[in-house]
Structures are given as structure tokens and as C-alpha cells.
């Protein structure tokens, strides 16, 4: 039960929980439409996130419409893909759409500043403790203060205390065959690494992506199973015993300059399916659905979900549609836009990190570039 902690709580049209790419870009779009928006972010900008930091070009025009001058940042444009099997066998492919590299440390902070400039009430170092829907409005407790809003969106990533409050299915006792993952990220410097290249390297029970971000820095980020880490006892031991079995990763971990003293790590990643709407909260990005890293680009999908929602809230606030219609429209738009992409991403992820399968698949696909082109096309969207 939420207790009033303020005599007259602040009331907003829309409250956004989580200031990642989905939350920030949604807040900017809605503020530009003159809605009263509050955004809660538990961290303080700028900060690093475990993320591959490759963004599909489908998002370029959208980010510039939000007010981010990407052209002036001189970012690496990425149009070449290398994929290695666990045994080091490599296939190469040209990316028709391609992408660009930028660190979340830089990108999120820039978007946060744009949000403020457009009138978003952005509350940093603020953790949402509870959300209750009653009498057709939401009450939100954050840092022991009460806020009210007509709509609330969840853009807080893969897992949050709010998921527990909502008793979401994926947060309950996991299915017997479900797998939990960990994500590990470094920023490194590699002499001679091409700015137009993204590499994906397989190892036993995982895969690692490497690509340039701004400056001469590369992002190295990998996903592996929690049981892989448990087996070897520590991140460093696992890297020595498992990742370095791939000759390309062996070279990078041995020769690159690592900028962090320690990696950034997130745990309890589970790719179980989720509902797009939970107790009238509208979910975006990783909070909304099963987005595997091999869906092409989760960051672009997060921003695209924000774009989708921003286009359908006007009818709700103008009285042309009710809450039920809004929730239905958003759920249908999400499924239409992402269902095939998510399905293909899950299929690709199934083979990645499985030594014998990956070795065979890479060897086979080297002779059929048209199939690779088809799969890459399915995992990337169109500009929005």
C-alpha cells in the first residue's frame, strides 16, 4: 500500500521509469509534443552500461530528429562483419545497412541533456520503489516521495525491482530448461582495428562482440552462461580457460590495452518472453520483450519501441481512444514490428556458443553468402 508522503504530489501526463535509450528518446518526443513528463533514473549521468555499443543505421535519422547532431561527432561507420567459430574459422560479410559505434557513456548523457532542454523533469539518483494503478491513474513512490501520472512506462532494462512488484511471469520460479546469462564489457585499445568493422567471436557457451566507438577506443562485450562462470570460479579464470580457446580472442585479450581496471558485469540475464503491458504499465525495450543481442541491435529496437508508443498516445490524451485501446494498439504495433526479428534472433542465438554447431555452421555459410545476407536482413529493421 502506498502512503501519501506529500500533501500535493506532483502530477504528470507520463512518468517514465528508466533513463536508457528507450526512456530518454520517449521523454524527448513526448516533451516536444508539450506533454508533462517525468523520468526516473537510478544512476547519475554519465555512466557506463554493459552494452555492445553498435547501433544499426536504422536509428540514425531518428536520433537526429531527437536533437542529437551525430554527424558532428565523427563516429565510426560500420559496414563489415566478421564471425569466427570457436576453432577460429572465420567468415566475412558486408553489411548493407550497417551501423555506427558510440559509447553509452557519451550517448545517454547527451540525450539526457536534450531531454532537460525540452522540459523533461529528469530525476537522477532516483529509484522507483513502487507503482500502483488505481482510479484510472498511477501513484509512484520514488526516493520516498509520491508522484502521480496518467500513464507510466517501464524502460528499466532486463530486470528490476518493479518486475518483482508486478510479479511478472519471467521473474517467478524459472522454467527447468531456462538459462541465465551474464554480460561482461570492457573498453579497450587495439592497434590497427578497422573503424568500419564489427566482429563476433564464438567460444564455448558464449560469444563476444568487438567494434569501435568514438575516438580510438573499442567496445569488447561478451555474453555467456552463468554456469560457465560458476564452473571456472572467476571472470579472469573463465577468460583464460574458455574465451582464449578462440585464437582471435586469445590475441585481443593478450595484446589489447584494457582501459578499465575491472570489467563491467551484469548477471541474471534471462531471455524468457515478457508481456508488453503489465498492470497497465507500457513496457519498452528490454523490459518489453525477449531481445537477444543477435536480433540485429537491441538499442535500435528500444528506440523504435519508444517511437511506436509516441505515435499513438495522442489519441489517448485527446479522448479519441481509451486506455484499453491504447494498450492494444501498442501491443499490436510491437508484435508487428519485432516478432519476426525476435524469432530469427533466437534461432541464431541457439547456435552461437555451441562449439560443434558453430564450427559447422560457419564453415557451411562461408560458401553461401546469400543466406547470410538474408539472415542479417531479417535481424535489422528499416529507418524510422
Image (tube, rainbow, N blue to C red):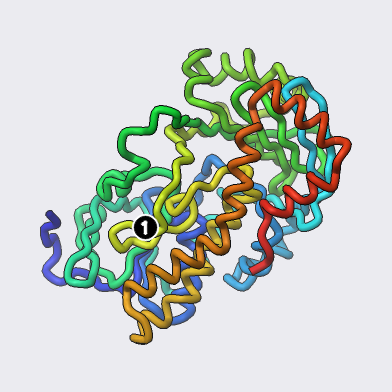
Side of 247 where 202 appears, left or right: left
Residue shown at 47%/34% (left/top)? 266
Residue shown at 73%/64% (left/top)? 71
Q: Is residue 370 visible?
A: yes
Could you say which quadrant of the image residue 208 lies in?
top right
What number of labels is visible? 1
Picture quarter with the N terminus = bottom left
Residue shown at 75%/23% (left/top)? 255
Question: What is the secondary structure assignment of the residue under circle 1?
Answer: strand
Side of 76 where 239 appears, left or right: left
Foreground of the two, 57 or 359: 359
Foreground of the two, 349 or 59: 349
Could you say which quadrant of the image residue 18 lies in?
bottom left
The answer to whether 332 is drawn above or below residue 204 in the figure is below
Side of 9 where 115 appears, left or right: right
Residue shown at 37%/74% (left/top)? 325
The spot of residue 153 in percent (x, y) is 37, 62
Foreground of the two, 138 or 195: 138
Picture quarter with the C terminus = bottom right
The answer to whether 138 is drawn above or below residue 275 in the figure is below
- The single residue placed furthest to the right in the displayed view is 367
Circle 1 is placed at which residue position?
Answer: 17
Q: Is residue 186 visible?
A: no
Side of 93 where 108 appears, left or right: left
The spot of residue 193 in percent (x, y) is 81, 37
Label 1: few (<14), some (14–19) or many (≥20) C-alpha neighbours in 10 Å: many
The answer to whether 210 is drawn above or below residue 40 in the figure is above
Amino acid at each position: 500500500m502506498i502512503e501519501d508522503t506529500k500533501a500535493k504530489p506532483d502530477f504528470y501526463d507520463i512518468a517514465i521509469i528508466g533513463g536508457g535509450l528507450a526512456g530518454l528518446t520517449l521523454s524527448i518526443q513526448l516533451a516536444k509534443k508539450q506533454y508533462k513528463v517525468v523520468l526516473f533514473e537510478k544512476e547519475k549521468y554519465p555512466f557506463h552500461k554493459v552494452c555492445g555499443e553498435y547501433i544499426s543505421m536504422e536509428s540514425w535519422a531518428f536520433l537526429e530528429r531527437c536533437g542529437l547532431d551525430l554527424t558532428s561527432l565523427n563516429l565510426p561507420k560500420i559496414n563489415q562483419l566478421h564471425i569466427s567459430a570457436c576453432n577460429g574459422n572465420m567468415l566475412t560479410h558486408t553489411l548493407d545497412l550497417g551501423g555506427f559505434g558510440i559509447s553509452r557513456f557519451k550517448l545517454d548523457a547527451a540525450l539526457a541533456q536534450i531531454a532537460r532542454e525540452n522540459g523533461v523533469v529528469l530525476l537522477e539518483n532516483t529509484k522507483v520503489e513502487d507503482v500502483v494503478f488505481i482510479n484510472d491513474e498511477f501513484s509512484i513512490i520514488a526516493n520516498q516521495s509520491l508522484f502521480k501520472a496518467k500513464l507510466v512506462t517501464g524502460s528499466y532494462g532486463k530486470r528490476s525491482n518493479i518486475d518483482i512488484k508486478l510479479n511478472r511471469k519471467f521473474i517467478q520460479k524459472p522454467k527447468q530448461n531456462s538459462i541465465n546469462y551474464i554480460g561482461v564489457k570492457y573498453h579497450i585499445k587495439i592497434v590497427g582495428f578497422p573503424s568500419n568493422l564489427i566482429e563476433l567471436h564464438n567460444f564455448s557457451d558464449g560469444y563476444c562482440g568487438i567494434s569501435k566507438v568514438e575516438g580510438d577506443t573499442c567496445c569488447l562485450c561478451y555474453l555467456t552462461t552463468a554456469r560457465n562462470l560458476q564452473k571456472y570460479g572467476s571472470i579472469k579464470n573463465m577468460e583464460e580457460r574458455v574465451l582464449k580457446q578462440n585464437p582471435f580472442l586469445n590475441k585481443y585479450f593478450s595484446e589489447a590495452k584494457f582501459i578499465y581496471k575491472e570489467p563491467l558485469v551484469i548477471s541474471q540475464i534471462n531471455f524468457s518472453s515478457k508481456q508488453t503491458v503489465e498492470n497497465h504499465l507500457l513496457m519498452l525495450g528490454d523490459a518489453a520483450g525477449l531481445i537477444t543481442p543477435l536480433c540485429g541491435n537491441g538499442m535500435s529496437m528500444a528506440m523504435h519501441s519508444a517511437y511506436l508508443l509516441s505515435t499513438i498516445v495522442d489519441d489517448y490524451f485527446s479522448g479519441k481512444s481509451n486506455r484499453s485501446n491504447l494498450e492494444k494498439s501498442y501491443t499490436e504495433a510491437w508484435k508487428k514490428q519485432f516478432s519476426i526479428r525476435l524469432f530469427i534472433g533466437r534461432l541464431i542465438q541457439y547456435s552461437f556458443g555451441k562449439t560443434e554447431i558453430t564450427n559447422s555452421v560457419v564453415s557451411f555459410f562461408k560458401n553461401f553468402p546469400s543466406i547470410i545476407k538474408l539472415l542479417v536482413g531479417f535481424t535489422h529493421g528499416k529507418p524510422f
